[in-house]
Amino acid sequence: MSASLAAQLPLSGQILVVYQMCAVATHTPSIHSSFDRTRRLIFNTQDIDVVVSEEEGWEEFDSEDIKEIIVRADARYYLERSKKREATHRILYCRLPGWATDDTRRVKVDILVPPVLNLPAINGYETTYFNNIPAMPIFDLLVMKTQGWWDHSNSNRADFRAKKSADVSDIFALLETAKQEDVWYSDEADEDRHTWEFMSHALTLAKRFVHVYGRCGQWRSIGFAV
């Protein structure tokens, strides 16, 4: 299972896995909607986003530092130079079983350090665990997924715009799961990690999404005033 393999990063307690935020594989559902009734992971992915949690000393590292630490700690991980002109970052990959005979057997791992992409800082105790894999709180994931949809919709790149349909499917699935888990907008506004700006932006994104796709009832069912 590619997702669980790449998620076992060698920085226990300092990294949380976030499935599908902004750079996602097309037609890949989010982790919160990707379990069958036996709680097994049932999807494949080619991209995994990892958010660094707010722990003591975490601000000492940037994403490139963390990539280097991971590669030194685990031989399954390696770095490649970006193909973009003038790019200074390197891309982190995790080798999957069968990689020796098929070099496409790999998963890209993006390292995100808040407040990049307007991510809120998250403590380890605020995560949800699926099969011992820590996942981002569902409200935060919904907001960031909707941000990804908006960014992809307005991108000049055709490959980014092509991700919109997967984003929309994920957002509707996350809305349903959020309702089932009794997520509520005003409760989230009371969380210390959520600034007024973050919550206001979340509402703006929801209104943009409803303007295009409707279904305002799904957002209202978790407390969004749309």
Image (tube, rainbow, N blue to C red):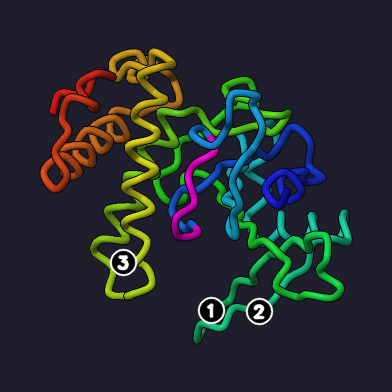
Residue hosting label 1? 87
Q: Tags 2 and 1 in contact by the CB under 8 Å rule?
A: yes
Near mark 2 (Cα within 10 A), the count class, few <14, some 14-19 or many ≥20, is few
Front residue of 58 and 23: 23
Return the x and y of residue 169 as percentages of the image width and height.
35, 45
State the quadrant of the C terminus: top left
Residue where numbered disc 3 is placed:
161
Taking the magenta stretch, the answer to whether it contains residue 101 is no
Q: Quadrant of residue 110?
A: bottom right
Helix, strand, or loop for circle 3? helix
Q: Is residue 9 above or below residue 35?
A: below
In this view, the mark in front (2 or 1): 2
**Amino acid type for the residue under numbered disc 3:** Arg
Examine the residues drawn in magenta and state their main secondary structure.
loop
Give the residue drawn at x 67%, y 61%: 107
Name the residue that disc number 2 marks: 81
* Between marks 3 and 2 in the image, the one whose residue lies nearer the viewer: 3
Between residues 85 and 5, which one lies in front from this camera angle?
A: 5
**Separation of residues labelled 3 and 1 (CA atoms):** 22 Å
> CA–CA distance between discs 2 and 1?
8 Å
Span colored in magenta: 25-31
Tell me if 113 is positioned left or right of 64 in this view. left
Q: Earlier in the sequence, mark 3 or mark 2?
A: 2
